[in-house]
Image (cartoon, rainbow, N blue to C red):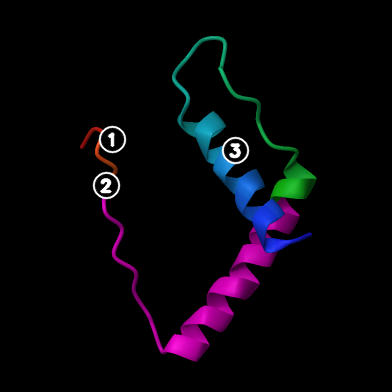
């Protein structure tokens, strides 16, 4: 799985997870693919932390996101 594929799967799953519509507007990601995607992104994140000596990331809320 590529990093771009992993990102797409996790973003799609997050849309499903945060969806308040009944029935949901988005579909839940396949759990096997989601697990692999998370494994891929964890490898990337760990490598990034080692390379850049980073321990924290500041996440800014989106403009349309409620607090």
Q: Does residue 18 appear to the left or right of 29 in the view shown?
A: left
Write the residue at 55% across / 44% down. Answer: 11
On whether residue 5 falls in the magenta region, the answer is no
Q: Which residue is mark 3?
A: 12
Quadrant location of the C terminus in the rendered image: top left
Image quadrant in which you'd find residue 54 = bottom left
Distance from label 3 to label 1 (Cα)? 17 Å
Q: Which residues are magenta?
A: 35-61
Q: Using a 10 Å C-alpha cutoff, classify the residue at mark 2 as few (fewer than 14 neighbours), some (14 to 19) or many (20 or more).
A: few
- In the picture shown, does residue 41 fall above or below 44? above
Q: Is there a contact, CB below 8 Å, between mark 2 and mark 1? A: yes
Task: Decide whether the magenta segment is chiefly helix, strand or loop.
Answer: helix
The disc at residue 65 is 1
Q: Does residue 1 appear to the left or right of 63 in the view shown?
A: right
Residue 30: x, y in percent? 75, 38
Does dot 3 land on a helix, a strand or a loop? Answer: helix
Q: Which residue is mark 2?
A: 61
- Of 11 and 23, which appears nearest the observer? 11
The disc at residue 21 is none
Image quadrant in which you'd find residue 13 = top right
Q: Is there a contact, CB below 8 Å, between mark 3 and mark 2? A: no
| Disc with the residue nearer the chain's start (3 vs 1) | 3
Write the residue at 61% across / 53% down. Answer: 7
- In the picture shown, does residue 45 fall above or below 14? below
């Amino acid at each position: 799985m590529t990093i771009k594929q992993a990102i797409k799967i996790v973003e799609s799953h997050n849309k499903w997870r945060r969806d308040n519509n009944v029935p949901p507007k988005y579909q839940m990601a396949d759990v096997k693919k989601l697990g692999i995607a998370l494994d891929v992104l964890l490898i990337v994140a760990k490598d990034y932390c080692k390379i850049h000596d980073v321990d924290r990331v500041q996440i800014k809320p989106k403009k349309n996101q409620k607090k």
